[in-house]
Image: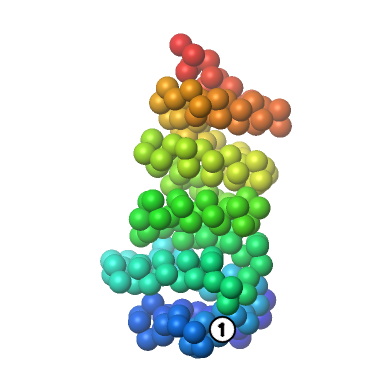
Amino acid sequence: MDRPSSMLSHHLVQLYWWGMLDLTESSVLSDFLATASDGALKSMIVYVGRSLSETQEPVAEEIVARLQMLWDYILTSDNARKDSKVFANFGWWFNTSYFDDAWALDRLHSSLVLAGGRYEPAFEALSRLSRLAEVYPSLVLYCTRVIVLTEREYVDLWTVDLSNILRTILGLGNAELTAEATSLINELGSRGYLTYRGLLKVSAN
């Protein structure tokens, strides 16, 4: 990793979230995003997520809003240089509690599509999705399916959350969602993860 560029990315994003930089054309930050290496951009994204997770103080709504604008800029701007694998690191932001559920889920969906299903960090990747399954079942199930079938080596880490997501979806009584959840359970079973087949028997009773 290019440590000087990574440290610069941390400094710039700090100035940005404090309102001392903006994302207008030819601003220092937008110029940096246009030329940053994948490693430096990843470092910046992870730094923001970790900073939010580790802070002991409330985070002002203005800062959260600015960070949302930053992610949308990275996600959609032609001026921001990025490799598809960079988007996997949105997980560091999604795992925090600061971003609105609907916004976070929508951006997670977009990020997973661009990242080919990759999600970082793998630990507790399904934790927030598990809490949102009842309110946003369709989007949660989509994101869950993409993550667990892409990051197959980590499925055993997610047994509790994955079981809760599937149990919640099956319990809603929606035929389409039940079919999708059943398909995922069968796919997991074909890969040797047989634990979840018991959920089908419970939901059928």
Indicate whether 8 appears above or below 131.
below
Disc 1 marks which amino acid? Answer: Phe
- From this viewpoint, is residue 6 visible? no
The residue depicted at 35 percent of the width and 80 percent of the height is 18
Side of 179 where 138 appears, left or right: left
Numbered marks: total: 1
Pointer 1 local density, CA inside 10 Å: few below 14, some 14–19, many at least 20:
many
For image coordinates 51% across by 48% down, the residue present is 124
Any part of residue 27 in sight: yes
Badge 1 element: helix
Residue in view at x 50 percent, y 79 percent: 10
In the image, residue 161 above or below residue 31 = above
Query: Image quadrant for the N terminus?
Result: bottom right
Who is closer to the viewer here, 37 or 31?
31
Q: Residue furthest top?
A: 205
Residue at point 58% right, 62% down?
A: 87
Q: Would you name the residue on which mark 1 appears?
A: 32
Q: Taking 113 as reference, is 41 above or below it?
A: below
